Image (cartoon, rainbow, N blue to C red):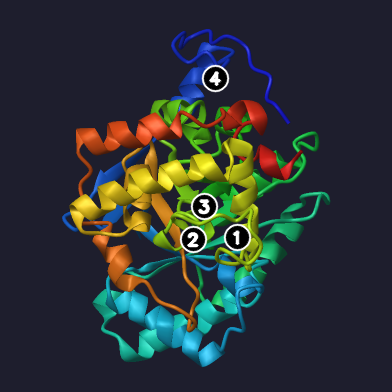
Amino acid sequence: MAVSVQNAVFFPNLSAFNFKSKITRARVKQVRCCQVATSDKRLITVSNGNDSLEICRVLNGMWQTSGGWGRIDRDDAVDSMLSYVDAGLTTFDMADHYGPAEDLYGIFINQVRRERPPELLEKVRGLTKWVPPPVKMTSSYVRESIDVSRRRMDVPCLDMLQFHWWDYSNPGYLDALKHLTDLKEEGKIKTVALTNFDTERLQIILENGIPVVSNQVQHSVVDMRPQQRMAELCQLTGVKLITYGTVMGGLLSEKFLDTNLAIPFAGPPLNTPSLQKYKRMVDAWGGWSQFQVLLQTLKRIASKHGVSIPVVAVRYILDQPAVAGSMVGVRLGLSEHIQDTNAIFSVALDENDINSIQEVSRKGKDLLTVIGDCGDEYRR
């Protein structure tokens, strides 16, 4: 679903945006939020007015608890979450529909309360998402839905509620966001955010005075769509990007380097929902042969810095305009990549590295043309 846009009125360099009046522009400016680096380079504070939330720049993504990645043992999963927190990776991202993710967080946070010092508890963050069906967004319905997540996560106040909406032709998303803002004022949500909204709808939301602090979108060296429209609006308004799919479910790794998936059983199996999803993105972008060129480029850079391909892939996206944090999926109790993840904070890509990545990344197709803007892959 392509997004139709008009020429900007007040910001001629942002041709994708149409700010209709000075009142509208002022309203957008009023919800401007800021990104503040802390003394710990792993942490960043995203704020909007009096609302602020300090998060880890690499987030522990919990989509893998929803099934399809292997059986999750509750106790092993919670132990793994504790290991990530003890290593300084203190932010977890989940959703109401990620299987037991919110319940696991509730068990985990209670264990942190019992077994860890208060100063560590204060750094732990649980970001969740609400993905409602297309029903009427009444105040009571929104309130009851958010209360479910609060109970499951066993917290009085959600650190961040990231809102998703399936059908833009139904304007109920504005009603839902206004009710979420009311819940924020009541102290049940600390920050309101979005997930998988496109640039046009983000602009509309901001024009309506809704103080969102971030938008979670797919973003990788293959999928650079967020830098074509979304990042410009984010830089104008202060809204930040939290990215997922940044290592493409594991495709951006040594495991898939120098493999030929066209030969049956010759390469690693695409045996998880994320691998299958991002293989389709590779096909849309340029195909497996072109993807191998990208992997070889990333490998050369990774070897130069003494790190792995995923470390370079995440670092590159973290360095993009408007990006506050990037997701790395965690297979709790099944595998662990704490050392690799922490290496992201110590590596610095130089100009030659960046030029090499850009050169091969741009050889692929323009996914904005092929798929549409951020989130359009869910609405086609």
Residue holding disc 2? 250
Q: Disc 4 or disc 2, which is closer to the eye? A: 2
The residue at 20%/50% (across/down) is 304
Horizontally, residue 4 falls left or right of residue 14, namely: right
* Vertical position of residue 232 compared to residue 106: above or below: above
Residue holding disc 4? 24
* Vertical position of residue 120 compared to residue 296: above or below: below
Asked which secondary structure carries label 3, the reply is: loop
Q: Residue furthest left?
A: 39
Classify mark 1: residues with Cα within 10 Å, few (<14), some (14-19) or many (20+): many
Classify mark 3: residues with Cα within 10 Å, few (<14), some (14-19) or many (20+): many
Amino acid at the residue labelled 4: Thr
Marked residue nearer the N-terminal end (4 or 1): 4
Labels 2 and 1 touching (C-beta < 8 A): yes
Residue holding disc 3? 245
Asked which secondary structure carries label 4, the reply is: helix
Labels 3 and 1 touching (C-beta < 8 A): yes
- Alpha-carbon span between mark 2 and mark 1: 8 Å
Say which of 269 and 180 sits in front: 269
Marked residue nearer the N-terminal end (4 or 2): 4
- Alpha-carbon span between mark 4 and mark 3: 33 Å
Marked residue nearer the N-terminal end (3 or 1): 3
- Alpha-carbon span between mark 2 and mark 3: 9 Å
Amino acid at the residue labelled 1: Ser
The residue at 28%/80% (across/down) is 118
- Alpha-carbon span between mark 4 and mark 2: 42 Å
In the rendered image, the quadrant that contains the C terminus is top right
- Alpha-carbon span between mark 4 and mark 1: 39 Å
Marked residue nearer the N-terminal end (2 or 3): 3
Name the spot of residue 127 as percent of width and height, x first: 49, 62
Q: Disc 4 or disc 3, which is closer to the eye? A: 3
Residue holding disc 1? 274
